[in-house]
Amino acid sequence: MSETDSMASRQWLPPHLRSLGTTIFAEMSALALASNSINLGQGFPDTDGPEVVREAAVTALREGKGNQYPPGIGIPELRRAIAQHQERWYGQVVDPDTQVLVTAGATEAIAGAILALVDEGDEVIALEPYYDSYAACIAMARGVRVPVTLRTPNFRIDVDALRAAVTPRTKVLLINSPHNPTGMALTDNERQAICDVAIENDLVVISDEVYEHLIFDDRTHRPLATMPGMADRTVTISSGGKTFSFTGWKIGWAIASPSLINAVRTTKQFLTYVSGGPFQYAIAQALALPDEYYASLTAGLQAKRDLLAQGLSDLGLDVCVPEGTYFITTDIRPLGFEDGLEFCRALPKLASVVAIPHQVFYDNVDVGKPLVRWAFCKQDSVLQDALNRLSVLKAN
């Protein structure tokens, strides 16, 4: 969509949605295709996940499982598998019939939770930078976004800033760990501080944990819902896309107390109602894969992280090594660039590579202006090719 078309379309939007436009991911992915560039922007793998999972989807299709509308809350097999996954990895016991809701990816779960829990004027505290759908969903709910900024080089949570952000109008803490786009993973102290703030101020926590198994250097993920006092005030969100490398299937879920999950279901049912019937059967089987699969996934991605991080550092960029996710953040100023958005729009012509500017994920745009996000969930040969192409920047 051209800038003129985008401006024209906004005249039809109500005022509270006019700040929304085409996502940066759509813009950069289109730019990658048009310029035949390597796409290190959007976070999707360039290889499929386990063959046994793909075959499970094929089998479901052929056997007629899920070819018609599945149950609105998700097929029983997947809901049971999600509950078993939580107990297996975190010791969290949830009822698959009253505490689990299957959604069209984690993005719909986020939308359903925000639309259910946020009223006009309610404040939602979010860690900045944030996944762009957060801003859109809060705007659609007519809520007020209140950022708590994570800053380089380590993107740690400023607990004092988190406490200071709470007002009588605060309704929700929107937390993401491991965190996109920074790669930060919560420490025990940060996790406890979030819980203390939520409990002391009677807040609901929407916890986006889609990268729960993409966490490195022997760190351990712990869902906020498993912390004392948090089970009845936390909506935990995850998906199969990141863990099993089938992002196009869009199978996500929300886990919460029965009353909270019913609230989320109330809005979710009027979004897609249901989706991905055969894929739900496949993800149910995927969640039961042995520990070796999860260990291999983590080790493989950590090696890719190290490959790209070292290569970007060798080019002269300041690299923030991530603790989890698919993404590396760099400061582009050592190469003589100041504006990440301008840099990313020029990069396909400069080096035939696409990345994502951080500043689109910030309210405090100047903080993110010199930062760029690179996805490393690609084949090693692709990462090396991208680094070879980016070597032209070093000469600048």
Image (tube, rainbow, N blue to C red):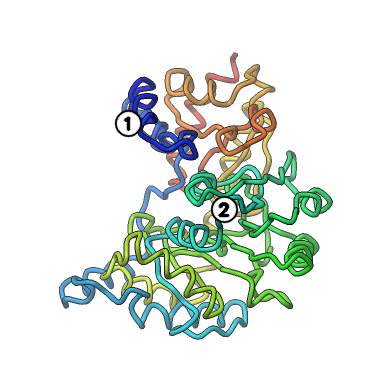
- Is residue 363 shown above or below 8? below
In which quadrant of the rendered view does residue 200 lie? bottom right
Given the image, on which type of amino acid does mark 1 rest? Leu
As drawn, the label of residue 325 is 2
Numbered circles on residues, count: 2
The quadrant of the image that shows the N terminus is top left
Residue 24 seen in the figure: no
Q: Is residue 363 left or right of residue 382?
A: right
- Is residue 133 shown above or below 171? above
On the image, the x and y values in percent for residue 273 come to 32, 66
Label 2, secondary structure: give it.
loop
Identify the residue position indicated by label 1 in the image.
33
10 Å crowding of disc 2: few (<14), some (14-19), many (20+): many
The quadrant of the image that shows the C terminus is top right
Label 1, secondary structure: give it.
helix
Residue for point 53% across, 48% down: 142
Point out the tag, 1 or 2, that comes first from the N-terminus: 1
199 or 144, nearer to the observer: 144
